[in-house]
Image: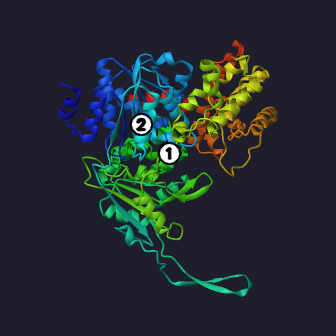
Amino acid sequence: MTLCREFNENGFILDEFQKKAIAAVEKDYSVLVSAPTGAGKTLIAEFLVKKCMMEGRGVIYTAPIKAISNQKFREFQALFPDMVGIITGDVSIRPFAPLLIMTTEIFRNKLLENKSSLDGHYWIIFDEIHYLDNIERGTVWEESLILLPKQMRFMGLSATIPNIDRFAAWLREIHPHTIKVIKEAKRPVPLHFLFQSHGKIYDELREVSYKVYGRRKKIRLKGGQFYYEREQRPNNPFELFKHLAEEDRLPCIYFSFGRKRCEDLAAEASQLDFLTEDEHLRILETFDTFCTKFGISDEERTQNIRLLVKKGVAYHHAGIHPMLKEILERLFTEKLIKIIFTTETFALGVNMPARTVVLDEVKKKYGRFFRALKVRDFYQMAGRSGRRGIDKEGYVYSRIDTRFVSYEDLESVIKGKPEDIKSRFNVSYATILNLYETFGEELFQIHSQSFYAYLEKSVSGSRQLEQMKSRLTILKQLGYIHEFRLTEKGYFARKIHGNELPLAELFGYGVLEDLTLNQLAILALAAVYAPRPKARKTRLSSEVKTLESVTSEVVRGIHRFEKKLKVAVLSKPFYYDLSGSLLKWMKNKDFHTIIEELEVDEGEVIRYYRMGIQVLREMLDTPVSKGLKTKIERAIHLINRGVIDAEAQLKMSVEME
């Protein structure tokens, strides 16, 4: 019996695009799959994983965010006990397993630093491969595809990409093996679009009225003049909550683009009770059991969310404790939470479909400006509605404020073609050093192989190439490369992926060796922390001020070189706002007490502490002294405990499956 037949006989009815993708995998072809969110791309990846496990061939699954990586680890661990590993920077469990789950950054780093460690792996799955278009992180996907080992085949899964044929043509140009493109335009569960505007629900886009309703209101201007404007009918989300319950269109994922807005909407929705008596008992019992096991029952946010949960409501965003987010995800998957208010990262791939999706608005901030949603972003969120095998159709509600969104913009979002993916190729200093170690002065060949160069058809004089050359010049001028070889400082910087130049300069000056254990921890955290806009400056201790003064001078020196050579993105400064909280944590203070004194959400603090630990771990693999390594190891031990220990929490999560 073939594995394909086994899939069918186990209750999977494969669509044509799934059959085509599986047939290509059977022939050992690389595959690019472009299909709407919710069409069933995940099943193709699961087929490939099972095939590799049966044949004893290693396979890697990469994802853009750690939440997806953790979810995949739990899912595959249940299917293949003790054969699954995960490496995300926070976590390293069975790093030499035949099935490895990792973030794309970790995979890229392995390609640059130790490609031979991947010799036993023959396939890689790039989940959400259109993330190559992400301005901040997309270059990692492009570098990974360019540097792919010869023995490896890849499967790229994506939402609809209009220029997928051109994307595939680029890949065929840099890889000699066969690459098949599988396209699917149809969703198995069609979407029905509705709109809330002026307090009314509209079934059709053309019905959305741009007339201004309501009584006239007198507005006084300076100089004693007056004018009249009509008051808008309130577009109250509470009425929408009632509508969804009455029309049996729950569960619902409600997307909003602000954390505070998510929390406020959840509080408003909790005035209604969406649960039956039986569901009340089940949801509180499950919630309380998990919170107790994860040790977060006494947290203030846990108690606040418990009040929402008992009504079938929750909110979910990056500021929440990771384990609390996981509990809420489980409750939603079990159909106990009926409406969850969340930011858009929830749409990225965490497998939690619903009957209905609501978009609080169809505008968001891109860079410095607010504009109508990109079509791809809209459908990434909208695609979470409509559960295959459960719903006949999915419902997508867009809340419209006609003062801020034109009809033309609205129509382009709903009916427009998804945007082409673009190249964001922009290699870092660490990547340049790793490439130089292998290719020397020929390292620029990676640019000629980039998607950017393919699209431009002009390698010389391109902006990205000039940026690479500028960074290489800086590395040579600052002593990272001498006489065509990496110096000790160069070997340090090539192992640090993020803020590598400032940290390497401190290493070069001998500053790192002189730092205390506490100062090393503070420095690593300051290297990754970025305060939110308009955040209040934290008062620093005299010890930290001294460290800040030293690092600021180092960064200013680097910036002078970068500005002179017109480097587009300057090296990140150090921010010490969380230093006081970190020192308290390292002295075994209670995390809840520490959070109460901060303006930063607990989820953010946990994420930054973990990122700081990752920097310290990267330092361990550099040419620092044995004494410094001992201090680094001790600092990691003092930070990586309790709520910060991602690996321990993931293991606990797996045990509770």
Q: Tell me which numbered mark, 2 or 1, is placed earlier along the sequence.
A: 2
The residue closer to the viewer here, 73 or 63, is 63
Q: Nearer the viewer, mark 2 or mark 1?
A: 2
Whether the residues at callouts 2 and 1 have beta carbons within 8 Å, the answer is no
Left or right of residue 537: residue 358: left
Split into 4 quadrants, where in the image is the C terminus? top left
User: Marks 2 and 1, Cα distance to the nearest angstrom?
Assistant: 47 Å
Instruction: Tell me residue 648's x, y (percent).
Output: 49, 27
The residue closer to the viewer here, 130 or 303, is 130
Can residue 644 be seen here? The reply is yes
Left or right of residue 238: residue 505: right
Split into 4 quadrants, where in the image is the N terminus? top left
Q: Residue at x 68, y 31 (%)?
A: 469
Q: Is residue 627 above or below residue 398?
A: above
Q: Circle 2: is it few (<14), some (14-19), or many (20+) Cα within 10 Å?
A: some
Q: Is residue 52 above or below residue 228?
A: above
Can residue 544 be seen here? The reply is no
Q: Amino acid at mark 2?
A: Ala
Q: Circle 1: is it few (<14), some (14-19), or many (20+) Cα within 10 Å?
A: some
The residue closer to the viewer here, 353 or 584, is 353
- Residue extending farthest to the top is 626
Residue placed under numbered mark 2 in the picture: 168
Q: Please, what secondary structure does the residue beneath circle 2 have?
A: helix
Residue placed under numbered mark 1 in the picture: 302
The residue closer to the viewer here, 283 or 326, is 326
Q: Is residue 525 above or below residue 190?
A: above
Instruction: Tell me residue 292's x, y (percent).
Output: 45, 37
Colouring of the image:
rainbow
Q: Amino acid at mark 1?
A: Thr
Instruction: Tell me residue 336's x, y (percent).
Output: 35, 48
Residue 576 in which image quadrant? top right
Mark number, residue 230: none
